Amino acid sequence: CASLAEWVIAMDMYAKISKEVEPKRKRVAAAEADLRSVTDQLKKKQLQLQQVESKIKELQESYDHQVAEKKKLEISIMQTQSRLKRASKLT
């Protein structure tokens, strides 16, 4: 009889604790689901950022190349103009 009473008391205590813990478990599960969702979004945004940074690097390299080419052409123009002036003095 004493064992049965202990069992009933234990089951009652379990039920009370379960009522307190179950909502907390549900909140934890919901928070974990939100965390997974936000983590997935973060990964997507990080990938997009990486792609944008890669494109920026590519464009910067292209820009630097074009600026260097422009400087070469400006020097070539100046040299050609100088030659034309000297050639016109010869004739």
Image (spheres, helix red, strand yellow):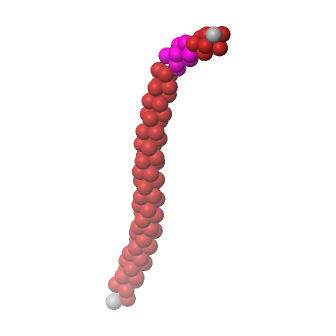
Q: In the rendered image of this protein, does residue 44 appear above or below residue 16?
A: below
- Side (left or right) of 67 relative to 12: left
Measured as percent of width and height from the top left, residue 19 is found at: 49, 16
Q: Residue furthest bottom?
A: 91
Measured as percent of width and height from the top left, residue 72 is found at: 44, 73
Which residue is rendered at x = 42% and y = 46% of the image? 45
Residue 51 at least partly seen:
yes
Measured as percent of width and height from the top left, residue 27 is found at: 47, 25
Q: Which residues are magenta?
A: 10-21
Measured as percent of width and height from the top left, residue 46 is found at: 46, 48
Q: Is residue 17 magenta?
A: yes
Q: Residue furthest front?
A: 1
Which image quarter: residue 41? top left
* Residue closer to the observer: 28 or 88: 28
Q: In the rendered image of this protein, does residue 36 appear above or below residue 74?
A: above
Query: Which quadrant does the N terminus fall into?
Result: top right
Q: In the rendered image of this protein, does residue 1 appear above or below residue 63?
A: above
